[in-house]
Amino acid sequence: MKSKKAAVSPDLKAAEMANKKNKWKLLGKQKMLILMSLPFVLYIILFRYIPLWGWTMAFQDYKPYKTFSQQDWVGLKWFVQLFTEKEFLLSLRNTVGMSLISTALGYITAILIAVFLNEVRYIGVKRFVQTVSYLPHFLSWVIVTGLVANVLSVEDGILNDILLGLGIVKQPIQWLAVQKYFWHIIGWTYVWKEVGWNTIVYLGAMTAIDPCLYEAAQIDGCGRLRKIWHITLPGIKPTIIIMMIMSAGHILDANFEMPYLLQNGMIQDVAETIDIYVLKYGFKLSRYGLATAAGIFKNAVNILLLIIANTIAKKSGEERLI
């Protein structure tokens, strides 16, 4: 046995050395790609990982004038206090509500528009619709918020002018002063801004569908609706699953700018999100530990939801991220 091991081990070592050399050669061939990616890796490390040191404030009674060793450690005090504060529970409810509405509307509209554009035979019309629909993606949320405020204005808002002109309403509606409208305003604004960009993903997936399937369905007498139902939608199903898994990791990442800029005293109870809560308690009220705990909770829930969605997809035999 010893002689066999002695005879085999040099071959194994030689194979390992050869693999290492091949890996270094491959890295040498891709050195330009590595150099190009280096700034992005440094960016992630500097602005994503190093700031995680600040999470220690969630376990301290943090005082800015004290050094790290002088801080008083309080354990999970701030996490427990989060769920005893009505304001945090309201912000959690608002965040989940806005995210679910925006996600649901975004998925449905993006898939419908992608299917519609895939069925359009006139290239000019297809390009026009696609260009017009994804241009708002390049506008900042601050600009979009200003446009929404002007459109929904009571005095000279175009929406109220149209409704009054058609006789649908008898007096202008104060859209931004009624709580029941606010989440829907956020949701449909998100759709208007991002639906074109999301549509590109599904159109890209549709290009991978074998055209022979459509030809065979045509021979069998299938109409457009049956082709969409039995070929197009199943063909982009993996992409839909992946997009849903990714969205699950952003359920508590409701848009910050719009609720923050559009909120007022009359709708504050439905407008404050977790991000606004963190900003308010961290910078305005200087309750750093509580604000940090809220931020950690948000990220932990997002990661957990992402893992759960990925696990469900895996056990169901569908496409998954990991």
Image (tube, rainbow, N blue to C red):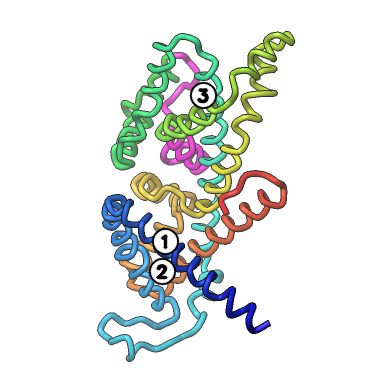
Q: Is 264 drawn above or below residue 134 in the view shown? A: below
Q: Which residue is mark 3?
A: 113
* Residue 174 sits inside the magenta stretch: yes
Which percent across, then down, holds residue 161?
38, 20
CB of mark 1 within 8 Å of CB of mark 2? yes
Which percent across, then down, holds residue 265?
39, 51
Q: Amino acid at mark 2?
A: Ala
Q: Secondary structure at mark 3?
A: helix
Which percent across, then down, holds residue 34?
31, 55
Which percent across, then down, holds residue 127?
39, 17
Kindly indicate the quadrant of the structure image that contains residue 18.
Answer: bottom left
Q: Amino acid at mark 1?
A: Tyr
Residue at figure coordinates x 57%, y 54% from the top left: 322
Q: Which residue is mark 2?
A: 291
User: Spatial distance from mark 2 to mark 3, Cα to Cα?
Assistant: 40 Å
Stretch in magenta? 166-190
